[in-house]
Structure formats: structure tokens, C-alpha cells
Amino acid sequence: MNFASDNVYGVHSQIINALAEVNSGTAPSYANDDYSKKSEEKLSEVFDREVRAFLVTTGTAANGLSLSTITPGYGAILCHTESHIFWDECNSPELFTGGAKIMGLSAPGGKLTPAIIDAKLKTLVRNTHDPKPKGVSITNASELGTVYSPAETQAISDLIRPRGMKLHLDGARFANAVAGLNCSPADLTWKSGVDVMSFGATKNGAMMLEAVVFFDASLAEEFSHRRMRAGQLVSKGRYLGAQMLAYLKDGLWLENARTANGLARELAEGLLRHANIRIPNPMQANEVFAVLPRSLSEKLLASGAKFYGWADDSLAADETLARFVLSFATPAGDVKKFLGLVKELNA
Amino acid sequence: MNFASDNVYGVHSQIINALAEVNSGTAPSYANDDYSKKSEEKLSEVFDREVRAFLVTTGTAANGLSLSTITPGYGAILCHTESHIFWDECNSPELFTGGAKIMGLSAPGGKLTPAIIDAKLKTLVRNTHDPKPKGVSITNASELGTVYSPAETQAISDLIRPRGMKLHLDGARFANAVAGLNCSPADLTWKSGVDVMSFGATKNGAMMLEAVVFFDASLAEEFSHRRMRAGQLVSKGRYLGAQMLAYLKDGLWLENARTANGLARELAEGLLRHANIRIPNPMQANEVFAVLPRSLSEKLLASGAKFYGWADDSLAADETLARFVLSFATPAGDVKKFLGLVKELNA
Amino acid sequence: MNFASDNVYGVHSQIINALAEVNSGTAPSYANDDYSKKSEEKLSEVFDREVRAFLVTTGTAANGLSLSTITPGYGAILCHTESHIFWDECNSPELFTGGAKIMGLSAPGGKLTPAIIDAKLKTLVRNTHDPKPKGVSITNASELGTVYSPAETQAISDLIRPRGMKLHLDGARFANAVAGLNCSPADLTWKSGVDVMSFGATKNGAMMLEAVVFFDASLAEEFSHRRMRAGQLVSKGRYLGAQMLAYLKDGLWLENARTANGLARELAEGLLRHANIRIPNPMQANEVFAVLPRSLSEKLLASGAKFYGWADDSLAADETLARFVLSFATPAGDVKKFLGLVKELNA
Amino acid sequence: MNFASDNVYGVHSQIINALAEVNSGTAPSYANDDYSKKSEEKLSEVFDREVRAFLVTTGTAANGLSLSTITPGYGAILCHTESHIFWDECNSPELFTGGAKIMGLSAPGGKLTPAIIDAKLKTLVRNTHDPKPKGVSITNASELGTVYSPAETQAISDLIRPRGMKLHLDGARFANAVAGLNCSPADLTWKSGVDVMSFGATKNGAMMLEAVVFFDASLAEEFSHRRMRAGQLVSKGRYLGAQMLAYLKDGLWLENARTANGLARELAEGLLRHANIRIPNPMQANEVFAVLPRSLSEKLLASGAKFYGWADDSLAADETLARFVLSFATPAGDVKKFLGLVKELNA
């Protein structure tokens, strides 16, 4: 019963198989192979417009490189305090942007709002003493398992675009957001004002694969140099291209996300049957954040279930916020088994 | 007949298979899996002493991260003008070191010597106007297909160690050097004064895998932060660990290198049977650099053979320097076929 | 009546004169002149021990360069949210440290405490996802006009030193702190655990001059390279050295600070005679932060007095927090005149 | 007899006096004072068109900040191997540009030519492996005492402008070039295709002052943030503004340069009267590079004259290349005295 993260699970069999399928013979190196090229075409199909797409191996690299196209070192990126770029990447955005300020803003449910962003922007007016606000980064699905709707995304874009700022989307769990909202990838991105995104695949079935996808083509212009400089241009590029093609083929990426989201829903519904468990935020993707009695949480962990506690100052001393992440590969039986365990231990 | 590079070939079947073999179930993420941990142990066995080893996805990242441990931004790294860090990585070492100067020195046969390094160091004495020399980086096997012997490596170390400088080894084709010299990995590294190396696997059979291997443990102390910050900590680490374990198992890495080196020797011997073809430098690894009549080179390329021309100011106008790279996966028949073609076209 | 900042006032006449006095003849360039060298000796006398001291032209540079000696790019510096390095320097610490995280912590009265620092350190334990905490920076006198006593400074050092962290002191108004506490410069720095400081002179009478002063000599080892790289090694160094010598001569620096502190005390006492004005924090240096009725503040500004409002969420809507900075050069009559104006307008 | 550099001399009396003249009363800080603002107007007059001008304290900062506006970290700047940005600034351009490659090209007489630049550009075509060439930096007067004419400057601009590259001018001794060519500042800059320059003042009479002057206004757009971030926004800005106004007033800057150039000419002519002394390059500014018998050079130095030897591989073993720099403040008698010494010792 491992709900620690979606990245503790393996690679989808179709993606593993794809690696073997492209293995024979030669292919041009450094992303000049056909698989890498076709990835861009397929992503254009997925997004229902021409996009520029560059494959990299980690979400950290995808985020940092994305942000490097929208802010110089004297700029600022506004984001949520729970976001990976603020809180989980050991100064990686600072490295790739040349020292830009990553400003974390607190906001309920893991989601920024135009009002919260606007309030911060109103303080950044002391001319050269402040860094220049250059962009906003949102995560969808968010780090707290919630999602931004197209309208919510658009509202943020409407606020910042007139100020010359760009909108970045950290889509480490983008598939889960699309599946959760049942909208189109286009609706949730460029049609709502997103300029550049980190299109995640690793957590949702790939091995090591993310794409930086540009909707604002001007940002992509010299991106191949940025990727090379970052040590993210793999020489045997076909193995990234092949992963992406398999990931997108016949909607595997959304199918995986729907599976994970469905398991999350099942888990959430089971937990909510207990009067002393609550789920504070809307559950819209593949993560369940539940407030449990601390004693119950400890017993569950002691029984071998794996999940993480999350810091939350608003809780009572005998409560804990637990995060459960579901994967396409989580055994369906594990959810049932875990709910049984909760029932048993929640005396 | 593709001799363009060793990275145009695929992944060794045992390594592809290893990915599938570790695919089931869960594994701790972010390099906390058993495969990643065992990689370090196995590399310690390979090098016949305890080493610290960190897996990354590209040689560019391995080099830049290695150098970041030996120089601050106000320092300088001395290397050959043909070296990847000077010439092929689009300012990546500058990114990871925070702006250190990568100083390329010309030297025959792609190899630095103590005399050439010393001459440069003698000019870097203008106190704070010059960057502080912090290290030397050598490539073994070199970019011109030659190798540094243990004695040659030691001589460089002997020059720089008393000056507080460190020695980095770019081992993108380290296996080919070890196989070519028929010495031990230990002899060619820490026993000869190497402090940190980029241990290459991709070109020699892996998919996307290099290791930063530290012989000077003090340099490794906070390296895990550096790797994370560089976007090189893959979340599903088992797929790097599994590649490395398969690469090292039963000496596959040296076997692959011997195969490639053998093909290179065969090609070289065949070419040298022609009076109008010469090989200027010792041929000691898996690359053949041959001077051909320009017309012959053009005919070979027109016939579909793939290889690169190399800049060389010392040649006559009707000559060209051609680079042929051999891989463990180069079909043996291709070398014979190519030699036949040379015979046919070299009228 | 200009209380906007101490940097709106000019240069002390003895310092201006000193520039003319050193102007004839030649002097070795790039800080090799006698005046620059003697500055280090004089600062050693001031601090009652041997120090390493490097002259630069701005406090921003002094801070960024100081911090660059205690943190790599993957590290974190903890400081107050009001501190200049967090809030006023447009990502300059990020530039000079190569992208370190500057973490602002809220704390009452502009002063960090061991408890507040410790609480933050307890969250930075997620291995490589978090930057490595490398130092704490305190400002003395603080940005809110308060001071850290030697004991308070020592308490912070005692917390962080065992963790391998260093203590930086932003001393843009260090003279005012020393004068306010009536302690020795040594007591407030190395005897209390400070490792490196920005020793301010510009705000307190110099033209453009700060010194980076090292008590931990190991941090200073290659600092001259850092200063050069930062564009802070002025070629005609005698004009920085001469400023510093004049600033320190016969205790001018402390005399200036005592004058400014005295004026601040006079202003504070005058304001506190009004029942509707309060001064929330201890007033210990040359800045007065007073809570005024908003209407009074507006009338004072309209009358031509210059001072800044300061953001403070804790105030009532009809109140404002006003900052008054006093300089050695503030005309004594201006304080009296201003207090008269307050009396007149505070109906 | 100090010919070591122009920066060993002091500040022109009119500039020293100007500091005292602006010293009374208050002035807005951080370059918002009238003197800083008027500097920009006066520089616009000097250049006979509207320019954007930003004052900084060192030439190293002026260069690095200038270059930061024309290249990102993955770019390259081409310059002469003798240029300060390549050879004298301890990786400062790398710091301010975020790691761009500063590529030094050898060329006779310290001057780049379109042919030499073009030959280098033809090698930078390997897509993302090479940094992207973003600009060329020339120094006028050059580090070898020669000058670029307007036509020579224009020819370089004509080569690179169509490639989207920008032209930077390091004008540490710009006044000497203008005086030497007897052309207008406009002719030598924007009328010849210069986009941004470092306008030097320190070597030619100021205390610590350079300006970054933009002819391409788009490059200047967010420059105030760059200057702040670099620690180059001095708080008491009036003392930079006052220096610049005095430097430009009534053509003092050109008068100083003409004085220095005249002394250089006198020295050169005197040296050339000796059959065993030659001056290899045209002498067009305030530096004399002369080839002397090594024994003579040693005797002159032993007699107390100060000048530097310069590396030059093309000389005979018994020759040395000596650099003599003349300043507006070099005593005229020193040149005569030195020539007398040469006569005496050159037996």
C-alpha cells in the first residue's frame, strides 16, 4: 500500500516496450531523430495547434528552463508557496534563470488567484529596489490535489498579460488535471492564456520524460541552446522521443490519468465515510489530502502503509494532514485494503 | 555504414532488458532505490576502492557538475581546445560553475602535457586580474582518439596538485581508454591523481547514463544538492541504477569497448594499406582520425558512408581529416564494406 | 526637513577634504596604494584584533560579496523579511552567490531570534529538495531602528555555529548600533560570533564606501578575486582608502553616529509627547518609526516634510507607520521645526 | 617618471572641486538627483543625439553590464585577445552575463577586422553545441594604443548587424581615441554602428566613474534593474553625476585626452630617434608600445622609471615590448627627463 508518490511506481508497459522497439539500427543523435521530431507533431495534435516542444529528463529541468525564457536574473516569478519551483527544487529555478527571485504567495487550496497576485504586484513598485515581475507560475493539478479551471487560468492571464508578464504552467500532473476537469488540453493552456508549460510524463507512466511546450513561439526561439547548456540534450534522443510517442499514443496519457484519478476518488469516498476524517479542499486529480486523527495516521504508518504527512499550521494538535498519491499503477486492491485498514484501526 | 558517432547506435540488449526487469512494483524515488545505491558499490568494486558515485543523464551534466565541485565562478579550468567542455557544450560548464573560465590550450594529438599546462599557469600571475586556476580537465580517451597513460595522467597531477588544483577526467569514452591501454580503472584514475571523473556509459551501450565519480571524497560532500539543483535528480531513479548495474555486470562495459576498439583497429589497418591515407596520431581507442585525399572523402560521403570532417589547419588544400567512430554495435560487416568502398573509389 | 533617509545628506567635510589631500602625485592602482592598505590596519585597530578588510563602493555589493563567501548557489541564507538583502537589492545577493535562496523570516521589531531561526531550520530537512542552510544575516542597527545586543547576537551564533552555518552582519548603520549600545565594535561582532560583516560608511558620512570585514580569515582567502569579478575593484583605490581613513580618524565615525542618534532621540521624545503618537519598537539608533494618525502624516507631508510611510498590516486603517531617519548632517533646527509643525497640525 | 598606467595619476582638480561644490544640503538618493539626470542630457549633447546613460564606478562593471544587455548566458561575445573583457577582469563578464562565452581572437595591432570576425563566425555553426554569437566588443582606443577609425568600426557593424549581433565599444580610453582621430564622438559610435558603450572617465581625470551609454534604446529598457542588481547603484548619486558634469564641462575630457596624447607623441618621437628602438603599431592615443633592447629596458627600470613589459612572442630574445601610458597629469618634464635617460643609458 504505497501512496507516497506517483513516482514510486514504474513505467507503463507500452512505454517500456517502445524503448525496445526503437533500439535497432542507427538514429541521428542530439534530438535530430525522427521520434523526437514526431513528438513535437504529436504534441501539436494534442494541443490542437502548432506548438514548439522540447524533451528533457526531469520536471525540475523543465520548470527551470521554462522560467528562464520568461525572466532575466533581475526579474521575479510569482507562484504558490506550495509550488515545486518555490519549495522543492533546491534553487534550481535560480540556477537556470540566473538568479531570479521566486516569490511564494500563500493561498488556500494550493491555488493562486488574481486578487492574491495583484496584492503582491502592488508592493513591487519601488523601482529598481524590487525585482521586475516577469511571470506567474501555476501548477495544474496543484500540489494540493486541486485544479485550476480554464476560467481560473484565464483570469490570472488577464491580470498579468497587460503588465507584460508571462504565464507558466507546471504540468507535472497535467494529465490528471485534464482528466479531472474533462476539458481539452487546449482549453486548459493556450486558450486560457498559458505561454509555456512543463508537460509532465514521468509521474504518469513514463520513465524519465517531460516536455517544455511553448504556445508563445517567440519564447522558444533559442531554446535549443538553453536545453543544451542545461545538460538536458540527451545524445540518444530517440529514447525520449519513443517514450513521448508511446505516452500520447491512443490517449494512453489520459487513460492513465483517469485510472489514477478514479482510484483517488475511491479512496477519498472511502475516507469520508468516517466522521473523524475530512478532506479540506476539492479533490480533483490523483492526490487526496485528508485530515486524520494523528493517532490513526500513526497506526496506519505503523501497519506499513506509505504516505506523507504535510505541514499545516491550521490543524489541531491531535490532527494531521496526510497526502495520498494514486498512480495508474497503484493496485486497485491496495485502495480497498487500505480502506479496510482504516476501518479496523479507526476505533 | 555509419561512423558519425558512437551515439548514433542503440542500447545494448542487456541494458534494455534490465529496464524491463526492474519495472514492477514500487521503489523509493529520487535515487533512494536499491539499484542506485548498488551502483555506487559496484563502481567502488570497479575502481578497487571506495568511491562516491552519482548518476546523471548526460555527459554535459556530468562534466559541468564535476567542475562545479573544483572551481568557483572566479576560477579557471585548463583543458584542451578539442575538449567537450571547451568546445561542444554551449557554455554549460560556465552555467554549472557560476561563470568560471574554461581555458582551451592547443596541444598535439588532443592531449595536454605538463609543459603546456605549466606555460599557461606562468601567465596567470597578475593577481586578481586573472581568474584563479583551480583545475585541469583531461579527456580519456581524448577527442582525437588518443589516450593518456597512467604515467601521463600522473605527470599532470604532479604538476598541479602542489598548486592546490584538482584533476578532472572527462571519461565519456573511458571504457575505450581502459580497454586500449589494458590497464585497470584504478591505474588510470585515482592511482594517477584523478580527483573526480565523468564516467561515461551512454556512448558505450547505455541509454542515457553517466556517473560523476569522486575519488576525493571531500568534493562529494554536498554533491547531492548540486545534482538536484541541476535538474539531474531523476525521480524514478531505479532506471538509471538498473542501466549502470547492467553496464558493469560481468564486465559488459569493457567487452563493449574492446569490440569497438577492435573494429577501429581493423578500420585503421585497412586504411593504412593505402599510400595516400595516413593516421597522424596513435590510434588507441574507438576513433580513427585519418587524413584522406579530399576527393576520396567526398566520394565516400556521396556513396552514403557517414563520418565527419574535422578542422585541421595543418593539412594541404586537397586533404581532409576524417573522423570515424566505432561502436560496440557497429556491424562488423560495415567496416569490411567500407574498406572495400575505399579500395574501389581510391583510384 | 528631510528625514527620508540618511543617504540624502552629503559627505562629511573631513572626508571630502581627505579626497583632495591625497590627490597629488601617483599611487599604485587597484587597491595597492598605501591608503587602502592602511584602512585594513585601522579597521584592525577599531575591532581590536587583526581583520581582513576590503573596500567597495556600495552596501549592496558589500552584502552580496560577503554572502558569496558563506554560501554556494545551492545554499540558503536566513534573514529578516525587512532586511535589505531580502527586500531591497533587486536580486543582487542571488547574483553574487550564484543563485542562493535568501529566505526572509518575519519577526517583531526587525530582529531575528534563535527561536525563529530554529523553527525555520527544522523545516529544511528534506535532504536535497531543500537548499542547504549556510548562514544567517542580521542587520545591526536593524531596518526598523532597533539593535541587536552582543548577547542577542551571540545567541544566534550559538544556534547556528554548531550546524556549520556562518553569521553575517549587515552593518550599513553599524556605527549607529555601536553608539546606541555604547559597546565596543569587537563586542558587537567577532566576540559575539560574527564571521563577516558589511561595514557601512556611506550613510554615516562617506561618499561611496563600505568595507567587507572578515573576522573568519578563512572566508577572506580568495576574496580579492571576488571583488574584482564583481566590478568592485576601483582602479584609483586611494580615494576609497582616504575616505576610510578620514572616517575612522579620531572616532569621526562614532561621533557622527552619536550626533544622528541624539537627533533621533530628540525627535522621538518630542513625538511621544503627543498622546496619539506611539513608537512601537525600542528606538536605539538613528531611525524613528512612529505610528501617527494617517491624517497627521498626510498634513506633514503636504507641508513639505520628507519621510516615508512603511507597510504594516497590524495598524488600524486611520494610522500610518512613518519612518524618520536622522543623519549627522541633519540640521538640528529641522528636528525642532518639525516637532513644532507636528504640534501645530496635530489638532 | 611613472608611465605604468594612466590610473596611477590622480583626479583633475576641476573634478575634485566639483565634489565639494555639490556637497551641501540634501539630494534624492539612488541616481534620482539632478546631477545624475543632467549627466544623461550632457552625454546626449556630446553624442549629438538622445542617448540613455547610466553612471557606474568601474570600467569592469560598465563592460560586464553592457554585455549583459546583448547576450544571454548561452551566447558568445567576440573580442580581441588583448581586450580587458577577455583578459583582465577575472571572469566579470561571465558573472554579469550569466555565463556567456567571451571569445578572444588574435589580431595584429590590437584591432579586430571583419575578416577575422567572419572567420570565427564560420566555425560557430554546429547548432546547439556552439554558443550563439550575440555580439562583438571592440576597445577604442585599443589596448595596444591603436584606434579604430569610424570606417573600421562601421565595417565591423556591417558584418554583424545582419546576423542580429550587437556592437559594444569598450571606451575606457574613448577620449584618447576621439582626440587622436580628431573626429566627433558621434562619428566614432552610433554613426558607425555602435549599439552600447562603456564611456570611460576614470583613467582620463575622474575619480571613479564610467557611464554605460546606449545608442540602441531598446537595450537600455530595464538597465536600471541590472545596475542595481550589480551593486552599482550608489546611494549618494550626486557624487557620480557631479564628476561627469565636471568631466564634460567645456570639453575638459577632450582637453585632458589631447594633453595625454600629445605627451605620448612626444615620447614616441623621442624614442624613435634611436635606431635600436621601434614602435610596431601606429601610435594614435596615449599609449606608446615600443620595442627596446632588453638590456636598455632593464636599465631604465633600475633607474626608477615605471612602465610595464608586455608579452609578445614575435620578438627576439634580446628585445622587449614596453608599454608607456601617458596621462593628462603626467608631468611634461617627466617625458623629457625619461628621454634624456634613454639617451644616457642606450650606449
Image: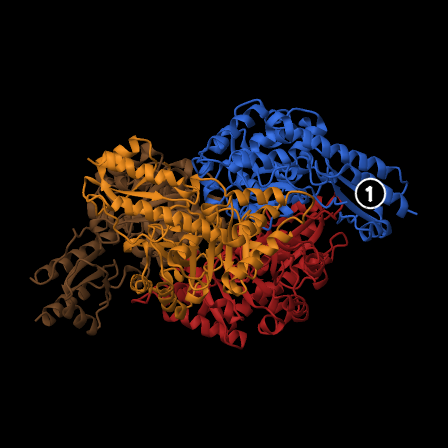
Chain colours: A red, B brown, C blue, D orange
Is residue A50 among the parts visible in the rendering?
yes
Between A132 and A206, the one nearer to me in the picture = A132
Between C72 and D103, the one nearer to me in the picture = D103
Residue A166 versus residue C128 in the image, above or below: below
Could you say where residue D260 lies in the image, as x and y percent from the top left?
40, 47
Circle 1: residue type? Phe
Between B56 and C66, the one nearer to me in the picture = C66
The reply, left or right, for residue B16 in relation to residue D69 is left
Residue B209 versus residue A248 in the image, above or below: above
Is residue B201 among the parts visible in the rendering?
no
Question: Label 1 is found on which chain of the structure?
Answer: C
Q: Mark 1 points at which residue?
A: C338
The reply, left or right, for residue A36 in relation to residue C17 is left
Quarter-of-image position of residue A197: bottom right
Q: Which residue lies furthest to the right in this view?
A: C347
SS state under label 1: helix
Could you say where residue A87 lies in the image, as x and y percent from the top left?
59, 50
Could you say where residue B347 lies in the image, as x and y percent from the top left?
7, 71
| Mark count | 1
The N terminus of chain C sits in image quarter: top right
The reply, left or right, for residue A275 in relation to residue D345 is right
Could you say where residue B293 lies in the image, as x and y percent from the top left?
13, 66
Q: How crowded is mark 1: few (under 14 residues within 10 Å), some or many (20 or more)?
A: many
Between C122 and D87, the one nearer to me in the picture = D87
